[in-house]
């Protein structure tokens, strides 16, 4: 079959690879209909996530049609239309029973590498390096979905393929942040990053009762999407002083909840940003925490921070003093999508959540390398490049 592979730092190509097979009774094989780029892929492309191998099939945000089911699968049959959580979880271990699905003890068949880096292994994820399991991704005609009863979700009639696509990764990631930050009705929430993840975190926060939601970025087309499709306010960090502006809008206190949806390749302004960029490129620090620092400074005393942006290792000049003295609660996670995908699909069906607008560029898989170029460089207003496999 055809698949889009990682072939080296900043290199991808469409290759012919072996078709996936059922390896375990709980697997299904999915004929992929739509698969999309995610900000997390950019960290793979940039070479910031270790343990990628040339030839690895990319893609972890996808939906499609079930074409084969393992003997132990109960919830799915051939012909079903499903969206699949990007993280792979067994549904039975202690972490899954606590609904912390991305921390599943059984989802990652290759735990040694992340145990060494982080002290414990986390769960598995499609196409997210050998450290997170070495699973083949969804930028392909077919993909094997392990633990399919847990990770694949039937798409309700009336929800389009395109809308359901983003219930795989971007939306449940946003929900993980908004819910995990402990939003209470009436809160002011500030979200750094207006990509798919930041937009979904903002919408999740609104549906969970936040009164004022403000999204921060520099790309005007993304900020326009936030105003039009999400219904949140926006700030441009190249024009406004973010900390001062957020205080101004919150009676001098700062937001109750701050959500970081930018990650290790944050942009910024001024000498501190240049210093971070040089250090990261010389591999003297693994991550650039520009937005993270700002979120900590902006947060009100006693407020909470949720880190959704992916970080791999160590950061420089982390404002530990501000965090500790202001009495902040800090959390972060890879998405616990199994917990949120059913309600997200329902919100889409009920017309309360718009996701299709994220698909700014739809193209056949053959144009995958071009799609990644556009997405990486944010060309032509690209928010997500979507690969269409069924034609
Ligand atoms: N936790 C999870 O499970 C999970 C899942 C998916 C994605 N992610 C991560 O979330 C992050 C965002 O993903 P995405 O798909 O939206 O990516 P994206 O690249 O489409 O969007 C990132 C946005 O951040 C903006 N940005 C850069 N520097 C900024 C700054 N200093 N302040 C404010 N905005 C800034 C960029 O302009 C861009 O619009 C990535 O790090 C990705 O790896 C995490
Ligand atoms: Zn992702
Ligand atoms: Zn588990």
Image (cartoon, rainbow, N blue to C red):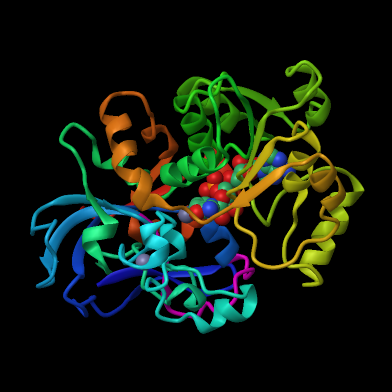
Can I make out residue 376 in this image? no
Q: Does residue 371 appear left or right of residue 49 in this picture?
A: left
- Residue stretch in magenta: 45-61
Q: Residue at x 26, y 80 (%)?
A: 18
Q: Residue at x 49, y 20 (%)?
A: 228
Q: Does residue 371 appear left or right of residue 290 in this picture?
A: left
Q: Main secondary structure of the magenta part?
A: loop
Does the stretch in magenta take in 57?
Answer: yes
Residue 359 image-quadrant placement: top left
Say if 342 sits above or below 366 in the image: above
Looking at the image, the residue that sits furthest to the right is: 271
Q: Position of residue 380 (x, y in %)?
A: 54, 39
Q: Position of residue 280 (x, y in %)?
A: 77, 65
Q: Residue at x 63, y 47 (%)?
A: 262
Residue 189 image-quadrant placement: top right
Location of the N terminus (image quadrant): bottom left
Can I make out residue 341 in this image? yes
Tell which of 102 and 70 is nearer to you. Answer: 102
Q: How many marks?
A: 0
Q: Does residue 71 appear left or right of residue 99 in this picture?
A: left
Tell which of 309 and 207 is nearer to you. Answer: 207
Say if 290 sits above or below 125 in the image: above
Q: Does residue 150 appear left or right of residue 319 in this picture?
A: left
Does the stretch in magenta take in 7?
Answer: no
Q: Position of residue 44 (x, y in %)?
A: 56, 66
Q: Residue at x 55, y 32 (%)?
A: 183
């Amino acid at each position: 079959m055809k698949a889009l592979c990682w072939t080296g730092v900043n290199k991808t190509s469409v290759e012919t690879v072996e078709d996936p097979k059922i390896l375990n009774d709980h697997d299904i094989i999915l004929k992929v209909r739509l698969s999309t780029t995610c900000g997390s892929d950019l960290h793979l492309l940039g070479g910031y996530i270790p343990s990628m191998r040339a030839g690895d099939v990319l893609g972890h945000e996808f939906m499609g049609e079930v074409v084969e089911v393992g003997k132990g699968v109960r919830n799915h049959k051939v012909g079903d239309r499903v969206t699949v959580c990007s993280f792979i979880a067994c549904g039975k271990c202690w972490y899954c029973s606590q609904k912390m699905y991305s921390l599943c003890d059984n989802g990652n068949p290759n735990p040694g590498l992340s145990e060494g880096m982080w002290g414990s292994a986390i769960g598995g994820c499609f196409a997210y390096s050998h450290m997170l399991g070495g699973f083949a991704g969804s930028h392909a005609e077919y993909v094997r979905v392990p633990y399919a009863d847990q990770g694949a979700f039937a798409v309700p009639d009336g929800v389009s393929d395109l809308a359901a696509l983003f219930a795989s990764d971007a939306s449940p990631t946003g929900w993980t942040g908004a819910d995990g930050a402990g939003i209470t009705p009436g809160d002011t929430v500030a979200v750094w990053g207006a990509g798919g993840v930041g937009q979904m975190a903002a919408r999740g926060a609104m549906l969970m009762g936040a009164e004022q939601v403000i999204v921060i970025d520099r790309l005007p087309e993304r900020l326009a999407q936030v105003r039009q499709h999400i219904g949140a306010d926006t700030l441009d960090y190249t024009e406004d002083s973010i900390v001062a502006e957020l205080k101004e809008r919150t009676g001098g206190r700062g937001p109750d909840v701050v959500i970081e949806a930018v990650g290790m390749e944050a942009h910024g302004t001024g000498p501190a940003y240049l210093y971070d960029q040089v250090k990261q490129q010389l591999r003297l620090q693994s991550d650039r925490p520009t937005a993270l620092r700002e979120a900590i400074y902006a947060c009100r005393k006693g407020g909470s921070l949720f880190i959704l942006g992916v970080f791999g290792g160590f950061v420089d000049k982390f404002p530990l003093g501000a965090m500790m003295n202001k009495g902040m609660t800090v959390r972060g996670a890879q998405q616990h999508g199994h917990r949120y995908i059913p309600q997200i699909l329902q919100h889409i069906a009920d017309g309360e959540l718009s996701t299709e607008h994220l698909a700014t560029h739809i193209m056949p898989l053959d144009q995958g390398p071009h799609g990644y170029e556009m997405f990486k460089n944010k060309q032509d207003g690209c928010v997500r490049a979507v690969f269409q496999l069924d034609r």
